[in-house]
């Protein structure tokens, strides 16, 4: 699978009208999501230390090559569950990179010792319920998963009873209102709801992010007392996962650490190969992933700019916005906040905070995107 396709940036700066156009837009924004849980065969832990270290590094290198195709977040479950030790949370525009990654991991030396003990496959979708929010969240945002830097992730697959679906939409909305009200009491817990109907065994896979596990415990306990809980058929297993960098999550599995090798570099710079320069024409935009962040690239009259693709207002996809080449700016498609593509500065509209800008280099005719500019300066 190659790099994500480029597209000309000549979208009008307004919301398209018409139902089918709207549905097309929604479908194109929906993302596929996979939660792959691994456990290491105990035999791996008896290998020579040098072999373990080499295998971990080889695995990390292979996984990292998928940054161009998907947003990939590693988590450790060492110490939180007995039957799963490593989670790779994967988010992509189509399901094929999941298969490619699974095969690539299985083909490594360490892959021979990794058992995939749980796997959940799902997709984002707009909720059918009215969710009145105090925040800037929009329905559109629910179509795009953008993991935070929260320390913990709770993966919660569940199935509702069939009786639930026989209730009228009005009745379900009333029950959901109570459910949502409880959720609002725990603002530190961030929710990522995905849908699995027909794709996999469960109906919903919800990923909760928080820095406070006790808030999540209290939330789940309180939700048990709500009416909606009567309509839950199954909501186990449940996974408490710890957010880590890839090397750290592999080091948590055992063996000599490889993390230090990376961190001891004077400046830790990460670079992602994008594509040959001649395949990215002026006026086009592109999305790549760098260290778990979605980066938007813009070719403005032959100069390539890279910024965080998530608007700082409510995470609108900036590569879908309207570019003004003369001004070197982009207008967010969701609420029309404007950013300078050179500096990331918020120029106009509802936006207040700048977006991160990333280094761009052309080496031998190939575009590379690297560490955020501010980090480079501080480094
Ligand atoms: S998401 Fe609101 S202006 Fe971008």
Image (tube, rainbow, N blue to C red):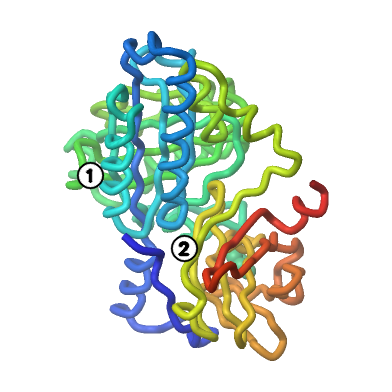
As drawn, the label of residue 262 is none
Count how many numbered circles sit on residues in the image. Answer: 2
- In the rendered view, would you say 42 is above or below 155? above
Q: Report x, y in % for residue 103.
A: 26, 42
- In the rendered view, would you say 236 is above or below 325? above
Instruction: Please name which of the two marks, 2 or 1, marks the residue nearer to the observer.
Output: 2
Circle 2/circle 1 CB separation < 8 Å: no
Left/right placement of residue 80 relative to residue 215 reads: left
Assess disc 1: are there few (<14), some (14-19) or many (≥20) residues with their C-alpha within 10 Å of its C-alpha. few
Q: Report x, y in % for residue 129.
A: 38, 53
- In the rendered view, would you say 323 is above or below 149? below
Left/right placement of residue 204 relative to residue 260 reads: left
As drawn, the label of residue 140 is 2
Q: Residue furthest right?
A: 378
Ligand 1 position by quadrant: bottom right
- In the rendered view, would you say 71 is above or below 40? below
Assess disc 2: are there few (<14), some (14-19) or many (≥20) residues with their C-alpha within 10 Å of its C-alpha. some
Q: Residue at x 70, y 32 (%)?
A: 264
Left/right placement of residue 19 relative to residue 313 reads: left
Which is more toward the observer, 309 or 190? 309
Q: Report x, y in % for residue 271.
A: 58, 54
Q: CA distance from mark 2 to mark 1?
A: 26 Å
Q: Residue at x 31, y 30 (%)?
A: 111
Q: Report x, y in % for residue 167.
A: 23, 44
Secondary structure, mark 1, is loop
Quadrant location of the N terminus in the rendered image: bottom left
Q: Earlier in the sequence, mark 2 or mark 1?
A: 2
Left/right placement of residue 86 relative to residue 217 reads: left
Residue that mark 1 sits on: 167
């Amino acid at each position: 699978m190659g790099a994500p396709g480029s597209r000309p940036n000549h979208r009008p700066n307004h919301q398209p009208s018409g139902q089918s156009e709207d549905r097309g837009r929604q479908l194109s924004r929906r993302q596929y999501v996979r939660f792959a849980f691994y456990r290491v065969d105990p035999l791996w832990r008896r290998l020579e230390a040098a072999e373990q270290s080499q295998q971990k590094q080889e695995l990390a290198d292979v996984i990292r090559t998928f940054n161009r195709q998907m947003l990939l977040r590693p988590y450790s479950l060492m110490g939180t569950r007995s039957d799963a030790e490593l989670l790779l949370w994967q988010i992509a525009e189509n399901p094929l990179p999941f298969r490619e990654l699974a095969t690539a991991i299985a083909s490594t030396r360490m892959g021979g010792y990794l058992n995939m003990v749980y796997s959940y496959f799902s997709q984002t979708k707009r909720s059918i319920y009215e969710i009145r929010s105090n925040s800037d969240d929009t329905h559109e945002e629910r179509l795009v998963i953008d993991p935070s830097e929260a320390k913990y992730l709770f993966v919660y697959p569940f199935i509702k009873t069939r009786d639930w679906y026989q209730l009228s939409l009005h009745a379900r909305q009333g029950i959901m209102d109570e459910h949502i009200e409880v959720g609002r009491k725990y603002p530190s817990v961030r929710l990522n709801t995905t849908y699995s109907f027909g794709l996999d065994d469960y109906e919903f896979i919800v990923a909760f992010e928080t820095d406070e596990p006790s808030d999540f415990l209290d939330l789940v306990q309180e939700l048990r007392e709500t009416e909606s809980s009567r309509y839950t058929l199954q909501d186990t297993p449940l996974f408490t996962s710890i957010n880590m960098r890839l090397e750290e999550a592999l080091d948590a599995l055992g063996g000599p650490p490889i993390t230090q090798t990376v961190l001891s570099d004077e400046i830790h710079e990460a670079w992602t190969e994008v594509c040959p320069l001649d395949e990215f024409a002026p006026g086009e935009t592109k999305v790549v992933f760098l260290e778990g962040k979605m980066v938007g690239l813009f070719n403005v009259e032959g100069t390539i700019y890279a910024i965080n693709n998530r608007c700082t207002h409510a995470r609108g996809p900036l590569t879908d916005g309207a570019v003004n080449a003369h001004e070197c700016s982009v207008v967010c498609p969701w609420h029309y906040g404007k950013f300078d593509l050179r500096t990331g500065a918020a120029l106009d509209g509802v936006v207040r905070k700048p977006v991160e800008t990333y280094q761009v280099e052309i080496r031998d005719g190939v575009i590379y995107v690297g560490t955020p500019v501010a980090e480079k300066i501080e480094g």
